[in-house]
Amino acid sequence: MDRPFDSAWLKWGRAVVHYHALEAEVTNYIANPDRHEYFLRWGDYDAKRHGFPITIASFTPWPTHWGVLLGDVVFNYRSALDHIAWAVVGRGRRAGTLTEKEARNVYFPVVGTNAADFKRETVVKLIGARREDLALVRKTQPYLRGKRRAQRHVFTILNDLSIVDKHRTIQPVQTITMRGSYTILKMVRCEETRDTRQPRERRAVMEVGAEIGIVRVRKTGPDPEIDVGVTLDFTPGITPTNRLDEWLQVTGQLIRNLLIHLDPEPPNEIAQLGDPTWFFPPGQIPPHLRPPPAHGEHFPDAGHSL
């Protein structure tokens, strides 16, 4: 390829194709809610917490092959970043002079600690890169979000998944409970609490034995008992707290916007991978990738930011 960023664009494009295939699988599957069953149990009364903890007894996991599709997305997203790194080094001051060892160390850095660590990594992983290219890569780094939020950054998740998926085992799509509600059907030797505080909404991963909430009551006698009806709202997850759909979309957008700043003209071959609207919002499709406009149709100029 004559243009240095074309391979990164195409790796990113292939990831987006896999992303849409996975998205279609998820949409079709969850359209039938009977496919995803779950059973709960509530333990004995907890005197310290004044209620009955509700835990997951069993549930139907998402289809195993979703993990394979997710691995395809992860591989190509991560490859796109590493191809960006190679292209950035290839147009830097050390272009054409790298030793074999130096070339092997070229990778896209993902740093969640601090600016000093980012600088140390770029000396090796982006050896000889232009100052303006380093500034663009820096804008994508997890550490800029702070230490706690860096662990939830899409690139941190991508980096971790890439290592595990390639070298250990297929990573299953997780199940996150988003919110839930309950109705007390029966109370024995207890009554509804007068505590009007509402529990804070939280995301929790679905796994056997995991606690998803607590039914608070006031004890009126020994060995209180309850019967409860529970409704849960859950969604596919990439981590115990990150939604799959959000991660797929935001990761793709961040890589795309970085590429646009490095090379604003994607290769024509992108259009051969799939529908251009998969890769760019309708108003931001580059002119050379746009389908012929219908009579009277107007495409606004693209606008992009990291």
Image: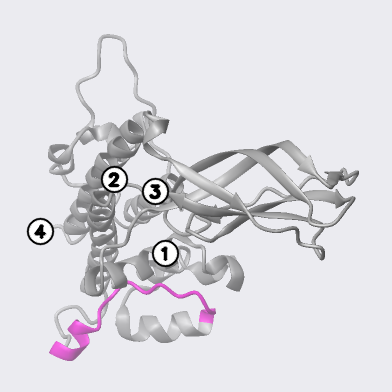
Q: Which residues are magenta?
A: 100-115
Q: How far from the left and from the top, in percent, is residue 181?
A: 66, 38
The residue pinned by badge 4 equals 2
Counting residues from the N terminus, which is met first, the one under dot 2 or under dot 1?
2
| Precedes in sequence: disc 3 or disc 2 | 2
Image point (40%, 72%), residue name:
110
Crowd rating for badge 3 (residues with CA inside 10 Å; few <14, some 14–19, many 20+): some
Residue 249: x %, y % from top left: 40, 46
Please name which of the two marks, 4 or 2, marks the residue nearer to the observer. 2
At x 55% / y 39%, what residue is drawn?
A: 233
In front here: 122 or 55? 55
Q: Of helix, strand and loop, which one carries label 3?
A: helix
In reply to whether residue 306 is colored magenta, the answer given is no
Where residue 186 sits in the image (x, y, percent)?
A: 74, 37
Residue denoted by label 3: 253
- Label 2: element kind: helix
